[in-house]
Structure formats: C-alpha cells, structure tokens
Image (cartoon, rainbow, N blue to C red):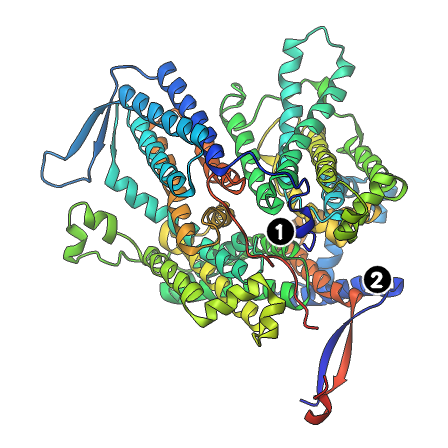
C-alpha cells in the first residue's frame, strides 16, 4: 500500500465541496425523503404512543403525539439544517452541532414513524440498542487496537465466528460457561496470532491474510458444529446470568432497565471502551502503539520494538474479538449456528471507521448501529412496512457517507496496512 | 544464542524457487492435513483419494463417458476464474478491490432484471437478443458498483478497502430485499427467490452443468493478458502497481486509470454474476452470494496476479471445494473438513510465499565488540 501517497489527491485541485456543504446536501436529501414519504403514506389521524418502560403500577407512562404533524416538523427542521449548512458553510464547530442535532432528529423521526398507530417502549428500545451494540463494540475495539499499530484486520468476523463456536463447544463439554468464555477469548487470540504471524513475520498482505482468516473460520466453526455440537451427550449450558438480577438496582424504574438489566458481555464492552481509549491515549504503551501506526521507522529509531508492539496489540485484539464471539453463542442465543455472527465483524469495522479510529467515537458508532438493529427487530414485531434489509444497509451506507468526508474527516493511521522490515 | 535467522531480500526471483516453494508449501499443508485427519480418526490417504475422485472422477468413469465430477468442478471454477481475473487486474495497480462479491451480485441482479421483466415489456424483441442484453446489463451494473469506489478513491481520496467492503453488503441486502420482497415468486410456495427465467434467457450448456460462462472466463483471461502484456494501458497499470511515484513522474494519470481499471474489474465481476444466474440458477435467489468474490481474492493472490495463473488456481480451488463435498458422502466426514483443509493449504501457501521473495540466512552472532560499527 505504498501507493497510498500517490493515489492521494491526484488532481491537486482545491475543493469547493466543504464538509458542511456535503452535510447540508445529505440532510436536505434526507428531509425531502422524510417529507415525501410522510405526505404520501400514512393517515393524518395516526397517533404515535411512546412508552417509558413497562412500569408495574398502572397507568403506564406514555407520550401520545400525532404522527404526521410531528414527522413533517422533523422533515422541515432537517431541511432548515440542510439549507443552512449548504448555503452558509459554517465553521467546524457549528457543523458538529448541526450534525449531532440532525442525527437526533433522524432517530426521533424513525421512532415516531415506527410507532404510528402503535406504541413503542422507548426504554426497551434503548436497552436493546445497547445489548445489540455489544458485539459491534467489541469488534470495533479489536479493529482499533489492530489498526492503531497499522495492522489492517478484516478477519474480525472470522475471529468472532471461531470464538463463538469454540466457546460454545467448551462450555458444552465442560458444562462450565466461564471455561467456555475463556476458550472463546483464547481461540480469538489464536486466530489473531495467525494473522499476526502472516502479516508481521511473513509480510503477507493484510487483506489477503484477513480474507484467509475468514475462510478458515467458516471451515473450523462448521467442522466443530458438525463433529461436536450436532450430536452431543450433554444438555445445553444455558446463557450467562444477568449480573444485577435480584439486587434492588434491577428494579429501579427506567434507570434500572437501561443500566442494570444486562448480561456480563455488555458490561465487559462498556468497561473495555474507556479502558482501550485510556491505554491508547494516556499511557506510554498507547503512545508507542500509535507511533508504530503512524511511522514505524521513526518509532524503531527511538527504540520502540515495532514487532513486539504489533504482536501484542493484534493478539489482544483477537482476544477482545473472542469476547464478542462469546456474546453470540453464550450470551444471546445459547447454541451455535453456522455463520451466526452474520457480518457483525464487518459492521464493527464500519463503526471503527465511523468513529475515526477512536474507541469512544467507535462506541458511538456501534451504539448507532445497535440502535438500527434494535429498531429493525421492533419493526418486525410491529409489522412496520419498512424492509429490514434497508435498515440492515444503514451501517454500511452511513459509513460510506462518513468516509466520503460528509459526516466528518476520517483519517486512518498513516502506516495502516504497510509491512515493516527492520533495516 | 550463537545463531540467528535473518531474512534477506532476493535480488531476483528465481523461476525454480517460484515453482518449488508453492509445491513444498502444498506438501506441508497436505502433511498437516493428514495429521489432522488422523487425529479425528479418518484415514488420510483414503480421504485424499476420495477428494480427488470427487473433484475429477476416475478413469473408469471417464471411459464410461461420466464426467460429472469434472464438470461440477468446472462449474464452481467459472465464477472463481472471472472474479479472480477481476480482482487481479485491480490488485495489479495496488487498488484493493475486495468488492468483487458485491459487483457480482449487482451483475446478477441486473441480468436477472432483464430476464424477468424485459420479455414482458418488449415482446417484439427477438429471443437471441436477450442473452447479450443480459450480459451487457450485468457488466454495466457490476462496473457501476466498481466505479463508485474508484471515483471516491481517485477524486475524494477515500480508502478503497473500506468502500468496496461496505458496498458488498449493500448489494447483498439489496438483492435479498428483492427476492424476499417485491420480486418473490408468488407461485414459489413461500421460498425466497424470483420466478424462473424464460428458457431463452438461459446460457447454453456445454457439457453437464458447464455453461458458456467458462468460455467467458477463458476469453476474459486472454483479454486481460493482452491488455497487460500488449497495450500501453497495461504498461501504465503495471507501472502504477510497481512504482507509483515513477508512474506519476512519467505523467500517467493515476486517477483516470483507477476509474478505468475499476470499470473493467467491476464489469468482469458483474459478468460472473450474470453467468451464474443465467447459466446455473435461472432465477435470483440466495445461492448467488456465496463468497466467490472473497475466494477470488485468494485466487488472484495465489496466482500472483497472472491471468493464466488465475485460471489454473481457480480450477484447483474449485476442485478442493467439490472434492470436499465428496468426503462427506464417501467418508462420512463433515464437509466443513474440506474448508479446514482449504484454510490450512492457504496458510501454508501464504507463509511459504515469503521464501520466494526472501532468503533465510543463518547468521552467526558475533561477539559484541565486533558488531559495534553496525
């Protein structure tokens, strides 16, 4: 990928298209879509009922608002934001505010539209978003850890899939979920070690190696399922317990639901996000990692062991991806299916890019994509007439928009994907 | 430690080494696979011979005119060849098109759209016109899906690894939406998939299920080879791939080349999609996106981006896949075992590849004072 520098800016022209203008255009198009869709479909009398948690004592707290007028209002607001950004091309700071408020309106609009003539429990939606964002968040962290030291890892999907299979197998045969979790983490680490060996030691291109990891993972997990899981003498090991079940925290209205009704992997992800951020940006190890990611030669000359940094980061990243794999088989479903990770590893990469290779931004991206997932499930249950494939596309489309520089500037580590050899 | 291993770049890549190393890697992988098979209680030699028979058939079958195994391998090899060629031309200029899967799906979608709806819209069209139109639609749709990341890379500096990867899933979900939703066959007993195309939109078959797609693949190989070795454009592509800085100083328009190459690359992958739907499934359904575009990346790389190499490697990888299905039937082993073997072979090949570019030297460590001056 040493062509990077030359592929950059081959035209050399000054850009008329600013970030704010791009954002404005994006919101303007969105506003038109919202308005046209609202006015063409949906009855004017429809009401959206938004619940605030399933509260035991009646009557349940509910917000009832007319659907069509609120959607038109949201469409108009988006249009105003779009026009303002397009015409005025405001400063970075203002653009960020516009971006954030616009995103909030879009999310609100989606919920209100979905709740037309029905009721949606907002608190439950938040809870589901966090839960479904967990594997994306863990995969995103794995991606950040690798790419910050310049190893591209498109094998996260494969690492998660292997971990889901191995973790489930071990927990089945030992009848101990925590041993299963350990096995999942280790198997993710082993797959990552393969990736590290190939890319760091054998100088194989990172894309090729990652593709191989994914292909191998389909084989390994398929084999495990056919050979060990389909016929087995044991009962299913069950699911991870809810951490705070039985404590008073669990029963707090609204807050308890949003904060304390999860299984362990969710908390693992929520702890790891700030932890990885802290290590990357506030410790010597993180500084070295980022130095290796930006300029390995310079890092080497000041005495940083480039190979060690890369090995440790990539293998640890595999372990984190392994946690994400355990989420599927041990925390959510309670069995293993072929290809059960269902491209979450790639959505995780999308979240990483969306968050500009920063764990905190990436977590925001993961939550957004988790929200899309949760909304998708809600739509299925409520039989809302939006094809789930379109919502499934959202993470990928948003990432395309993001990398095209519309939502923000995204810059990968400078040496991303480049092999390093000592001279 | 008195000795250490040191990698040194080979000044020139020797032909013999380039031949011996992959062979050695393959043998090592087979030995590794044999140990694996032994450990799960299967006879390695019998398993390997079952795979070979499953992929190519036996001489006895051939004399009886039974070429089923071989033709099935060719059927699987066809999309791998076309997609392998598609990604190899992009990789040649260091454009990492990992979106062949999505380009294939869009090609299949466009060809399917023509086959499904054009007969009703234009009943006056002669039947022979449909296949060329479908091929054209497939190529254009695939190319469009390839040009988008090309344009983004050339003019907005967006990393193509990200965009081509993301576009895969957008394409796959789009196709899913169609065959689960508006295009679903009402008479299909609820199975996701469109209605079957009219028979005049089917690609003619050559032998068994082998269809004209194989001819497309071979023509594409000739085409790519001619471009790379006989044209100025091919020279530019190779120069950009080998030395982008020199290419730019030589006045080569890199942005334009990116877009053109992605047109060709995406178009080829789209053609592969058209060949799959018109030659095999005769409808749009789940089986279109089964990872040919991703395996093609490996094909291209193992073939060292050489068009004829792509043809050979695609055939061998297809044999591995088809042979893998066979061991499930004759050996009672899970078919996934073949994927594990495939993965092992890939890893040994990848790891071994470094030996063709670097040589391992055993270096005797010198006493500390001797290494002072470096």
The reply to whether residue A173 is in sight is no
Q: Is residue A126 left or right of residue A205?
A: left
Residue found 27% across the figure and 56% down from its top = A242
SS under mark 2: helix
SS under mark 1: loop
Q: Nearer the viewer, residue B213 or A10?
A: A10
Residue found 59% across the figure and 65% down from its top = A196
Q: Earlier in the sequence, mark 2 or mark 1?
A: 2
Which quadrant of the figure contains the C terminus of chain A? Answer: bottom right
- Dot label at residue B335: 1
Q: Residue furthest top?
A: B124
How crowded pointer 1 is (Cα within 10 Å; few <14, some 14-19, many 20+) is rated as many
On the image, which quarter does residue B278 sit in? top right
Q: Position of residue A305 (x, y in %)?
A: 58, 74
Q: Nearer the viewer, residue B42 or B244?
A: B244
Q: Position of residue A44 (x, y in %)?
A: 28, 14
Q: Is residue B1 left or right of residue A333?
A: right
In the image, residue A285 above or below residue A39: below
Of marks 2 and 1, the one in the foreground? 2
Tell me which chain the residue with mark 1 is part of: B
- Dot label at residue B18: 2
Tell me which chain the residue with mark 2 is part of: B
On the image, which quarter does residue A301 sit in? bottom right
């Amino acid at each position: 990928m040493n062509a990077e520098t030359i592929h950059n800016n081959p035209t050399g022209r000054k850009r008329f298209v600013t970030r704010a203008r791009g954002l404005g255009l994006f919101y303007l198009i969105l506003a038109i879509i919202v308005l046209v869709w609202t006015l063409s479909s949906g009855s004017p009398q429809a009401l959206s009922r938004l619940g605030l948690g399933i509260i035991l004592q009646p009557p349940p707290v509910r917000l009832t608002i007319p659907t069509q007028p609120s959607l038109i209002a949201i469409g108009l607001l988006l249009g105003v934001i779009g026009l303002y950004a397009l015409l005025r091309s405001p400063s970075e700071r203002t653009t960020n505010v516009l971006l954030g408020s616009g995103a909030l309106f879009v999310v609100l609009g989606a919920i209100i539209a979905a709740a037309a003539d029905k009721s949606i429990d907002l608190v439950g939606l938040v809870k589901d978003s966090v839960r479904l964002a967990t594997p994306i968040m863990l995969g995103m962290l794995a991606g950040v850890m690798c790419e910050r030291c310049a190893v591209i890892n498109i094998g996260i999907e494969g690492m998660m899939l292997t971990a889901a299979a191995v973790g489930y197998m071990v927990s089945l045969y030992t009848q101990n979920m925590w041993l299963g979790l350990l096995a999942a983490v280790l198997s993710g680490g082993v797959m990552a070690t393969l990736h590290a060996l190939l890319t760091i030691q054998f100088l194989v291109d990172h894309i090729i190696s990652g593709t191989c990891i994914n292909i191998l993972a389909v084989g390994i997990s398929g084999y495990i399922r056919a050979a060990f899981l389909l016929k087995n003498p044991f009962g299913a090991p069950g699911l991870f317990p809810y951490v705070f079940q039985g404590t008073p925290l669990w029963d707090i209205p609204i807050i308890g639901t949003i904060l304390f009704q999860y299984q362990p992997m969710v908390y693992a992800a929520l702890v790891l996000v700030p932890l990885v951020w802290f290590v990357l940006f506030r410790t010597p190890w993180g500084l070295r990692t980022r130095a290796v990611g930006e300029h390995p030669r310079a890092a080497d000359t000041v005495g940083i062991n480039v190979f060690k940094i890369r090995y440790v980061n990539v293998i640890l990243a595999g372990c984190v991806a392994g946690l994400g794999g355990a989420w599927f088989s041990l925390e959510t479903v309670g069995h293993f299916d072929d290809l059960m990770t269902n491209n979450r590893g790639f959505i995780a990469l999308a979240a990483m890019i969306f968050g500009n290779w920063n764990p905190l931004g990436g977590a925001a991206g993961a939550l957004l994509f988790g929200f899309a997932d949760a909304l998708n499930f809600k739509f299925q249950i409520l039989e809302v007439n939006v094809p789930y494939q379109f919502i499934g596309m959202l993470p990928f489309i948003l990432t395309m928009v993001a990398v095209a520089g519309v939502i923000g500037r995204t810059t990968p580590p400078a040496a991303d994907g480049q092999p390093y050899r000592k001279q | 430690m008195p000795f250490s291993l040191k990698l040194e770049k080979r000044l020139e890549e020797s032909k013999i080494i380039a031949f011996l190393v992959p062979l050695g890697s393959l043998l090592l992988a087979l030995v590794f696979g044999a140990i694996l098979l032994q450990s799960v209680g299967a006879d390695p030699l019998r398993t390997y011979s079952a795979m070979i028979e499953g992929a190519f058939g036996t001489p006895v079958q051939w004399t009886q005119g039974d070429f089923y195994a071989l033709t099935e391998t060719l059927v699987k090899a066809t999309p791998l060849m076309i997609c392998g060629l598609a990604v190899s031309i992009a990789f040649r200029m260091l454009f990492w098109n990992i979106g062949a899967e999505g380009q294939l799906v869009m090609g299949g979608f466009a060809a399917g759209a023509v086959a499904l709806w054009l007969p009703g819209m234009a009943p006056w069209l002669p039947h022979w016109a449909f296949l060329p139109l479908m091929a054209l639609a497939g190529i254009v749709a695939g190319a469009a899906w390839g040009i988008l990341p090309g344009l983004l890379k050339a003019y907005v500096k967006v990393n193509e690894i990200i965009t081509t990867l993301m576009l895969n899933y957008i394409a796959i979900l789009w196709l899913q939406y169609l065959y689960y939703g508006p295009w679903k066959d009402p008479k299909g007993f609820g199975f996701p998939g469109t209605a079957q195309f009219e028979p005049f939109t089917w690609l003619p078959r050559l032998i068994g299920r082998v269809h004209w797609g194989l001819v497309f693949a071979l023509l594409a190989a000739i085409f790519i080879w001619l471009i790379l070795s006989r044209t100025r454009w091919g020279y530019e592509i190779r120069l950009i791939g080998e030395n982008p800085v020199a290419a730019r100083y030589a006045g080569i328009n890199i942005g334009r080349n990116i877009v053109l190459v992605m047109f060709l690359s995406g178009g080829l992958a789209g053609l592969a999609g058209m060949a799959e739907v018109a030659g095999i499934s005769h409808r749009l359904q789940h089986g279109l996106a089964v990872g040919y575009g991703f395996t093609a990346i490996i094909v291209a790389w193992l073939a060292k981006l050489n068009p004829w190499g792509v043809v050979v490697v695609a055939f061998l990888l297809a044999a591995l896949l088809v042979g893998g299905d066979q061991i499930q039937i004759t050996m009672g082993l899970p078919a996934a075992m073949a994927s594990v073997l495939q993965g092992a072979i890939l890893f040994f090949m990848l790891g071994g590849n470094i030996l063709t570019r670097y040589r391992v030297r055993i270096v005797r460590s010198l006493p500390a004072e001797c290494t002072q001056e470096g």
